[in-house]
Amino acid sequence: MKAAPGNLPLELTSFVGRRREVAEARRLLATSLLVTLTGSGGVGKTRLAMRVAEDSRRSFADGVWFVPLGELHDPALVAETVTAALGLPDQSGRSLSQLLIDHFATSQALLVLDNCEHLLGAVAELVETLLQACSGVRILATSRELIGMEGEQMLQVPPLSVPDDQQSPLLEAMPQYEAVALFASRAAASVPDFALSEANCAEVAGICRRLEGLPLAIELAAVRIRVLSAGQILQRLTDRYQLLTLGSRHAPTRQQTLRSCVDWSYELCTEQEQKLWAWLSVFVGGFELDAAEGVCPEEVVGDDLMDTVASLVDKSILGREQVDNVVRLVMAETIRDYGREKLRESGDLSRARRRHLSWYERLVKRAEIDWIGPDQVSWIERFDREQPNLRGALTFSMTESVVATDPDVTARMVNALWLFWQCRGLLAEARHWMGRCLNGSDTAGAEERVKTLYGDSLFAGMQGQLDEAAARAVECCSLAEQLGRAESIEIANYARGYLAMFTGDLAAAVERFQSALAAGSHLTGTGLQIARSIGGILGLAIASGLSGDDETAVACHEQVLAITAPRGESIYRAYSSWALALAALQAGDTDRATALVESALRLLRRIKDPVVTGWCLESLAWAAIREDQPTRAAVLMGAAATLARTVGRISVTLPNLLDNHDECEQLTREALGNHAYQDAFRAGTAMSFNESIAYALGDGPADEPPATPDAQVLTRRETEVADLVTKGMTNREIASTLVISPRTAQGHVEHILTKLGFTSRSQIAAWVTEKRK
């Protein structure tokens, strides 16, 4: 059975206890649209949410999706963070909220929003929007306080159960206490021969009581079993708490407990470890060793950074995770906040943030230089991992103190990152930063501004925001003419060329691209300069091919290959193959077009570029129907449609291709009949990114008509609703008959339409009637 989609992180350590809370959370999710797990820091809200989500997978056919918000500090990027977690690059020009609504409209999915307390307003707005429009969505949130929504159900997450301090615990009874079970599990992970015994059970019980059952505090204490006995750990905790009673503590007891436990962990670190802990807290969402070496100053790093980092991992100050076969180091939120406080107390916070910004600027500039080369895919994966740090660096780059000393730094980073944002389809994020950059300080350099205006114009056009694209292009050209520099004028012509192509004016597009390329020197310069010139060549190839000038399109393709192939580049080779395939289709050479698109898809499978992949799938559908393969054409159209919901259909971005799309759909329907067409189309829409590429390349299922949907695809309730639709009832009448709300009835009808691949209630009625025969 195919697993439901989703992105839940793997649980790297055992989950202990919480049976009651898991059962209660699942009960609340069954009856409520929004459930919020609340509790103090370190009480285990995130881990509980992950377990509840994992145990609920079978209840959500369209997946369980985990969105960590703890590292996000810009409320404007909440929707972007959710779409990115779901793998929904934006390309359609719609708002991200609308994009999420379209994605979840007929879905049965669980969305887990983790660590919402610092973004309550933005989270509440998005949650309300989704829940009002998407009847099949449930949201499980974690927060130190309620989100504040009507109908929100709260589950207070308590500490783990601990032994009663009024009686001596019996060894055989110890495992029933969750805090004890957690301590024993984590201690055994640190020292494999550790086990609860008559000799240590009283001390372990005392430790858990002292730490009030707080999971984070218990885990920090358990790791000390490497160097201390349970009795010694308890003694140190007892001494600390006796000391704490002498002062005034205004924080709640549980927060005092966690704070004092982190204090204790800090004091058990060497001076070098303490300094490194503080400096590493400047990172957001984890880091890799080279970043630590680059950001931390020499007096902190010393000659033994790796050993010090390893020691912090051993002491559970740093966590270790492996992503893309690369080890990343992470800090729990409480640990990072503590380190940031120490960094602020030492007076080094501003210095650390400047070094962090400087290092990430160097990182993106290195990628810019290497982009047209064999490491391109590695750079894309690195930036995927570094998104939180890149956002943090960009945010700090816009502060007054940085702008006063280096007004161009934001623009330099944005102009280097647009290559990454483009291939990931993250156009809303790109335009967010470009907009802040363009609307910010007037002291930024004009040359960088020209580049930013070009990028924003290009992305606005790809989103279908043609008025905004035109306004940016006009300003770009005006500023370039004032500067009078060849590179700036070349960039301005690219902006004009793409704007003309997006509006369907192919002759003007060809003229602008030719002017830019005639003045440019696209075989030399940095990776970004070469990439920009290749973009111009591709623009000329597409505009020429659509105009019927196959000779120019071929020449452009050969030129792109001459630049990229010797360098081992992937993205632009794929783009070029697809552009040449368009020209071949226009010329009627379907065999050549198919071979070129398949070549592009083999490259795109590594890159995971959703934009051009969707365009390639639809182009293959056009070729398939011309080769009298209607079922294959319908499946490919369905697969392309799934990507088009999030990245934009090719015929929307390039309006000259609208006739190709309409002709393909019409011919395919005529060849198969509406019922078989819907079956094949629906089979394509159900494919994942990798499955659709495998099918297109012949690595997937054979080109056979998918089975006609049977009644078992519908739930019992949906079957009842379908029967009532067949009787001609409206949603309100269905709601009255089944004693449900009209909105719920509407949701059931929409789910039925999606599952059966239909577009009207009459199709549902015909299908039900046919099934009764």
Image (tube, helix red, strand yellow):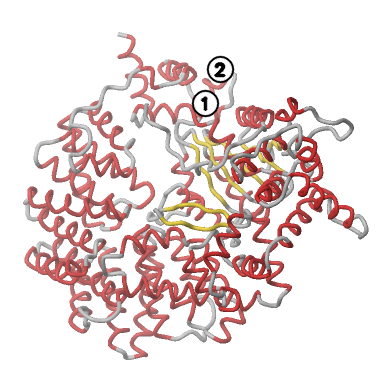
Question: What residue lies at 50% left-to-right and 42% top-to-bottom?
Answer: 10
Callout 1 amino acid: Ala
Task: Where is residue 141? Give x, y as percent.
Answer: 62, 43
Q: Is residue 369 above or below residue 232?
A: below
Q: Residue furthest right?
A: 246
Q: Residues within 10 Å of mark 1 (few under 14, many from 20)?
A: many
Task: Where is residue 481? Give x, y as percent.
Answer: 33, 88
Task: Where is residue 9? Give x, y as percent.
Answer: 50, 44
Seen from the viewer's position, the closer of residues 384 and 575 is 384
Q: Is residue 241 above or below residue 752?
A: below
Q: Are marks 1 and 2 in contact (CB under 8 Å)?
A: yes
Callout 2 amino acid: Leu
- The Cα–Cα distance between marks 1 and 2, rounded to whole angstroms, is 9 Å
Residue that label 1 marks: 745
Residue that label 2 marks: 738
Quadrant where the C terminus sits is top left
Quadrant where the N terminus sits is top left
